[in-house]
Structure formats: C-alpha cells, structure tokens
Amino acid sequence: MRRTAKRANKTSGLKIIAGLLALGAIIGAGYVYTAPQFERQPPQIQAQESLFWNRKNPLQIKLTDNVALKNFELILNDGKTDLIVGKGEFKEATKEQILQVGYPKSNTLDPKATHLRLQISVNDDSLWNFFKGNHAQKTIDIRIDYKSPNVNVLTNTRTITQGGSALVIFQAEDENLDTLHIKAAGETFKAVPYKKEGYYVALIAWPFLQDNFKAEIVATDLAGNTRVTHVPLYIKAHQYKVSWIQATDSFIDGKITDLASSDPDYANIEDKLEKFRAVNETMRLKNEDKIHMLGRKISDAMVQNWPIKNFYPLKNGQRVAGFGDARHYYYDNKEQEVSRSYHLGHDFASTKMATIKTSNPGVVVYAGENGIYGNMPMIDHGLGLYTLYGHCSQMLVKEGDEVQAGQDIGKTGTTGLALGDHLHFGVLVQGVEVQPMEWYDASWIKINIDDIFKAADKIIEGK
C-alpha cells in the first residue's frame, strides 16, 4: 500500500511539473507572439520594380519598418557580375530611411551595359526568426538611358508683346519621353501633338505684369535626362495705363454692398472701406482663380489644324476700358488710397442688353455667376485659347454647349461689379490673361498664327 501511495504521489508530482512546464511554455509563447520585441511584420521597400536610369542622378530607395530597421545590403548586377554598392547598419530606432544609390566609380561592372538589376535586402530589429529579425528583399530591373531628348524648333511667332500671345511649333524625339512643356515668365504651358508623332504645338503668353520674358522648351525622359531649348522670340515691352478712381459713398453703398451681401464671406463686414477692399481685392482674386482654373485645361488630342478668326463680340461696341489698366481707388482724395486692382479685359458698350456673339466655335466650359464678373459664359476654343463674357443680363448658352461662329451667347448687362450696361470681354491662353487687341486683329492672326502653321506644315509634310 505504501509503495502504491508513493507511486501515486510521484505520478501526481510529475503531472504538476508537466502542467507547470506547459503553462510556462504557453505563457512564453504568448509573450513571444505579443511582445513588441518579437513583432513579425517585415520591413517595406518602396521602389519601382522597373525604371530608367541616366547614371547621373542617384536612385532613391525608401525603406520603412513599423518598429526599427537594422541593416541593409544593395547588390548591382550587369548580367555577369555582382557588385555590392551599399551595405550598413541603421541607427537605433530608425523607422524610415531613404538610401541614395549612385553608379559605382569602379570598373567592375560593364560600362556599356544597358540593363542592370539592383537587389535590395533589408532586415529589421525584431527578435523574431531566432533573433535574426524579419527580412525583405526586392529586385529592380533598370534600363540605362543617358541621352537627352532631341528638340528642334520648327517655327514660331517672331515677336511677342508684354501681355500678348505667341505660337510655337517644334519637334521632340525620345523613345522614353516623359514630360514636355514650355516654361515662360514663370508660367508652364502645355504642348500638344501636332499633325503626326514627334511634332508639337503650343500657344504661349507673356503675363502683362512680368517685365522680362524668356521661353524655353523643356523635354525630360523617364531616366531624368532633360533638354532645354530656347525659343527665339523678339520681345516688345508695353506700358499699361494707370487710372485713379474715386470710391464714392454711393458706389460703396450700392454695388459694393450688394455684392458683399450676396456672399456670406463678406456679408457681415460693417466698415465701408474694409468692405470695398474685400470685394475689390479678395473677392476679385477668388473669381479670377476660378477663371484661371477653367482656362488651364487643354486636350491631349493631336491637332490637325486650328483655324481661328478675329473676335468681334459686340456689334458697334465702343471700347470704354482697356486691358491691363492699373486702377488705384481713393476715398476723399488721392492721398487716401483705399484699394487697387487690375482690369483683365476690354469693356465694350453699345445699346442696353445688346446681343453678344462668339466669333469662333468652341465649347462652353462655364455659364454661371462669378462674383464681380456677374453672369459669365466662358468658351474653350481649343489649343488653350479661352474667351469670357462678363456682366451679362442674360446667358443664352449653358455649360457643355458646343457653339458655332456667329452664335448668340448672351446679352450685355450690369451684373457683378458693373455700374453701366456693358460687356467685359476677356481672352486667356492656358489660364493667363492676354491682350484681347491681338485677337481682334485679322492681320495679326494671319502673321502670328496662320502663317506659322503654314511654315511648319511645309517642314512636316515636306511640301
């Protein structure tokens, strides 16, 4: 009996020990699976799987980890030879690092190789995987391209006037072409395909407030190679009119208050001069921003031709205000200037509620109320050329309408910041306001637009 009791006690003890060991194992396993030191999320490698490289600019590889990065290794292969181009440890608690990978200066790799492979290996600082940490690996396929795009100006408008427009037609070639545009006076102008592959056209502008002007075609390929080509333009400065206008009580209490009351952003302004500045400056800039946004859109479709006629929006209209006028507003006397603004179009007046026509076909991109411009249709005529018609009493078109040359689009009026019945006519090139005067002139259009297309066509079509 005693032996049996001892055997039972021994068995019971072993079971308790086994139970404790199992419990300890469960607790230990639970700790391993839940403790931050044993996290199991691998590092992340942020890089394209295939890319172009000009061997000049370093490649950028972004590594991240939810806890901490530990070490990395970068191996570049030219198809025959491996070369370690980067290896190292990260500082403690580093969660993010951007590695700069330059082309090796040694002659280990074939300098004529056009394809390379970059193998990226990274470990984090976890104790998981028997204290080795989590591992991530990625291979990037690289195509070498160190030739800049080829760009040739075919023809362009000879002279551009401050505040005016010009046409540029050019050739751009690169099998890996990525971006293409014209930089001019701080603005970026989009170029679109013309006639056939490899040829492009762009309508550009000289912002009237910029004193200096230089236009450059900028072509960049997928490897980052860039070609900058100067557009040969003679530049002609223009002096714009300066006007001093008295802001009378009747004007502020009438039109200004009416416009301010219609917008909750300005409705509660009590001080009359503050109210005037809010409408004439803040509201005006907001309205112009909308116009700029609408006017920057340009189709990517290839252009085959672009016939454009001179604009004549209002029959027998008399011009009562010019483009680019700097307007200084004063209250009692000129020593008390209270606000200033620029007039970005031409004002025409004829009879009350006179009919407004569009001289060229296009698509109505906006037909609604726009603050100081009142009721305002805006039309896209293609190639980035837009016209707008402000202060309308009636709009005879709606957004999305396709209009034809000579079509009635509205009636003159006094909506917005207009004291008398008139039309505010504006012209924009890719969101930049330009002189309407050039676009009224059939001779200017022939010399600076039509003849430029004809000269380019002779080169492109070989006629």
Image: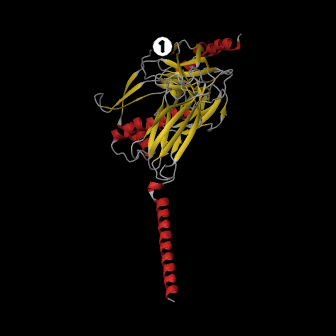
Compare residues 276 and 171 and report the one nearer the observer.
Answer: 171
Question: Where 157 falls versus 246 (above or below)?
Answer: above
Residue 222: quarter of image:
top right
Asked if residue 355 shows in the view, the reply is: no
Residue visible at 33% across and 38% down in the picture = 273
Residue visible at 54% across and 44% down in the picture = 136
Query: For the residue marked with disc 1, what is the amino acid?
Result: Ile
- Whole-percent x, y for residue 295 in the image: 55, 31
Mark 1 lies on a secondary structure that is strand
Asked if residue 440 shows in the view, the reply is: yes
Q: Is residue 155 left or right of residue 2?
A: right
Question: Where 336 falls versus 8 (above or below)?
Answer: above
Q: Is residue 400 left or right of residue 326?
A: right
- Whole-percent x, y for residue 97 in the image: 45, 40
Which residue has dot 1 on it?
Answer: 235
Report crowding for label 1: few under 14, some 14 to 19, many 20 or more residues within 10 A (C-alpha): some
Question: Where 173 falls versus 284 (above or below)?
Answer: above
Residue visible at 62% across and 33% down in the picture = 409
Compare residues 101 and 233 and report the one nearer the observer.
Answer: 101
- Whole-percent x, y for residue 319 in the image: 50, 23
* View extreme (left): residue: 335
- Whole-percent x, y for residue 213 in the image: 46, 18
* View extreme (bottom): residue: 1
